[in-house]
Image (tube, grey):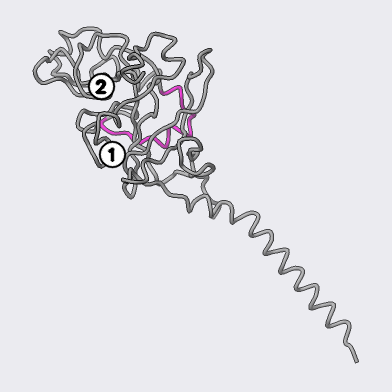
């Protein structure tokens, strides 16, 4: 004799279990997978990973697009990033005599004021919260030593070369000719030891040189440190053509 009541109860229980499991997979699993994505620094043979954070004018007409950042290094709590492209041109400091008097202190330059003032408008409030403050700065420039650091992937002149965006080039950023690779020079925050009115910068083919801090068509290639404890990584695969998206992790209800 078939006990239909018991069979129906079992089927209802199975359906409830399946519904609960489906709801869990739909609601919880995507978040879990997103949080399982992690960043790494430069690796020989694999290159860099890339993320997007903030927005800046980049097209020829000034269209605003996500800023692509190259991941140079990652620790347990932070990631050191540099803009993949030279975003604009600016002088480092309008008064080279004052620059010498200040001992080349980057935090006293016009460039520092711009990066930690007007440039911060490139980020939403939640994004700003992800930028680690170091020595009072959220955004900075690479140092000359950074650009010699093989662990960051800067082992050759070619690796140091960078290209200006159409917007930057259209608004006065210098570009080397085709036979020199069409790259654009960009500042570091390192003072030249011999010519103290100058700072270290990239030259043609990515080699390092120096130029007076008052030069105005030199490039700005920002760098920043991402605080990873509140970061959510989603979308993309971390490549230059399909970078990860970085956003603030939503606090979970207790």
Q: Is residue 246 above or below residue 37?
A: above
Q: Residue at 25% of width from left, 12% of height from top?
A: 93
User: What whole-number distance in Å separates the C-alpha atoms at marks 1 and 2?
Assistant: 16 Å
**Residue 103: image location, x then y, percent:** 13, 18
Placement of the N terminus among the 4 image quadrants: bottom right
Q: Which residues are magenta?
A: 120-135
Considering every residue shown, the one lying at the far front of the view is 179
**Residue 178: image location, x then y, percent:** 36, 16
Q: Is residue 55 above or below residue 42?
A: above
In the image, 80 versus 70, the foreground residue is 70
Placement of the C terminus among the 4 image quadrants: bottom right
Q: Residue at 46% of width from left, 16% of height from top?
A: 166
Picture quadrant of residue 221: top left
- CB-based contact (under 8 Å), mark 1 and mark 2: no
**Residue 18: image location, x then y, percent:** 72, 67
Q: Which residue was labeled with disc 1? A: 152
Give the mark, 1 or 2, whose residue is nearer the N terminus: 1
Q: Residue at 29% of width from left, 26% of height from top?
A: 141
Q: Residues within 10 Å of mark 2 (few under 14, many from 20)?
A: many
Q: Is residue 83 left or right of residue 54?
A: left
Q: Is residue 87 above or below residue 35?
A: above
* Residue 125 belongs to the span the image colors magenta: yes
* Residue 161 belongs to the span the image colors magenta: no
In the image, 68 versus 105, the foreground residue is 68
Q: Is residue 103 left or right of residue 117?
A: left
Q: Which residue was labeled with disc 2? A: 202
């Amino acid at each position: 004799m078939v006990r239909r009541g018991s069979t129906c109860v079992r089927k209802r229980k199975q359906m409830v279990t399946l519904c609960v499991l489906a709801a869990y997979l739909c609601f919880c699993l995507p978040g879990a997978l997103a949080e399982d994505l992690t960043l790494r620094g430069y690796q020989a043979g694999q290159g860099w990973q890339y993320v997007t954070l903030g927005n800046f004018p980049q097209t020829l007409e000034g269209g605003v697009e996500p800023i692509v950042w190259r991941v140079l290094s990652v620790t347990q709590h932070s990631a050191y990033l540099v803009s993949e492209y030279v975003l604009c041109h600016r002088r480092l400091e309008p008064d080279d005599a004052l620059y010498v008097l200040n001992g080349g202190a980057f935090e006293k330059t016009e460039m520092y004021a711009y990066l930690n003032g007007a440039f911060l408008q490139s980020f939403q409030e939640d994004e700003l919260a992800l930028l680690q403050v170091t020595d009072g700065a959220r955004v900075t420039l690479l140092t000359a030593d950074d650009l010699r650091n093989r662990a960051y992937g800067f082992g050759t002149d070619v690796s140091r070369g960078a290209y200006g965006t159409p917007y930057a080039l259209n608004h006065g950023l210098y570009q080397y000719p085709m036979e020199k690779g069409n790259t654009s020079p960009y500042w570091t925050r390192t003072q030249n030891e011999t010519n103290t009115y100058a700072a270290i910068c990239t030259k043609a083919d990515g080699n390092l040189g120096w130029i007076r801090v008052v030069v105005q068509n030199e490039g700005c290639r920002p760098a920043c440190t991402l605080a990873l404890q509140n970061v959510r990584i989603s979308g993309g695969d971390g490549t230059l053509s399909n970078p990860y998206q970085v956003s603030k992790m939503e606090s979970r209800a207790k």
